[in-house]
Amino acid sequence: MSCVISATKYPYTDEDGWAFRGKICVSSYCKGQVASLKVKDVCNWLLHSYVWGVAGYADQKGFADFLVASDLDKEKFVHFVSFDEWQKVMDVAIKNGAF
């Protein structure tokens, strides 16, 4: 199993830009940087950080991906992880009995 997941790193904009406010969509951010994240870190951020949310498509007809940040970096940047990438991680974990 690959221990990294592809993501896009975006700079923090301000409190109104975060997913919990229901205003996040892919077009809400400037260009991001490609990032490789440790799966262990993403899991930790999802479980222990209050900085995460689901990003919707601009047409508001579905969900694009999810956003997550560590508590330490929450006012610096957010990571945008696709559900497709996350599905690959879950498939490997389920196949190998990781749960």
Image (cartoon, rainbow, N blue to C red):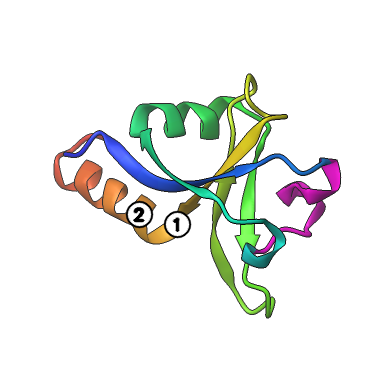
Q: CA distance from mark 1 to mark 2?
A: 5 Å
Q: Residue furthest right?
A: 16
Q: Nearer the viewer, residue 95 or 57?
A: 57
- The residue singled out by tag 1 in the image is 82
Q: Amino acid at mark 1?
A: Ser
**In this view, 19 is above or below 26:** above
- The residue singled out by tag 2 in the image is 85
Q: Secondary structure at mark 2?
A: helix
**In this view, 22 is above or below 70:** below
Residue 93 position in % (x across, y down): 23, 41
Q: Nearer the viewer, residue 86 or 24?
A: 24
Q: Residue furthest top?
A: 72
Q: Is residue 8 magenta?
A: no
Q: Is 12 situated left or right of 92 in this image?
A: right
At a point 66% along the width and 66% down the height, the residue shown is: 27
**In this view, 84 is above or below 98:** below
Q: Secondary structure at mark 1?
A: strand
Task: Classify the position of the C terminus by image quarter.
Answer: top left
Q: Amino acid at mark 2?
A: Glu
Residue 10 position in % (x across, y down): 60, 45
Crowding around mark 2 (Cα neighbors within 10 Å: few <14, some 14 to 19, many 20+) is: some
At a point 71% along the width and 61% down the height, the residue shown is: 28
At a point 62% along the width and 64% down the height, the residue shown is: 26
Q: How many marks?
A: 2
Q: Quadrant of residue 77?
A: top right
Q: Quadrant of residue 30?
A: bottom right
Residue 1 position in % (x across, y down): 16, 39
Tag 1–tag 2 contact (CB < 8 Å): yes
Crowding around mark 1 (Cα neighbors within 10 Å: few <14, some 14 to 19, many 20+) is: some
* Magenta highlight range: 15-25
Q: Is 41 situated left or right of 65 in this image?
A: left
Q: Is residue 16 magenta?
A: yes
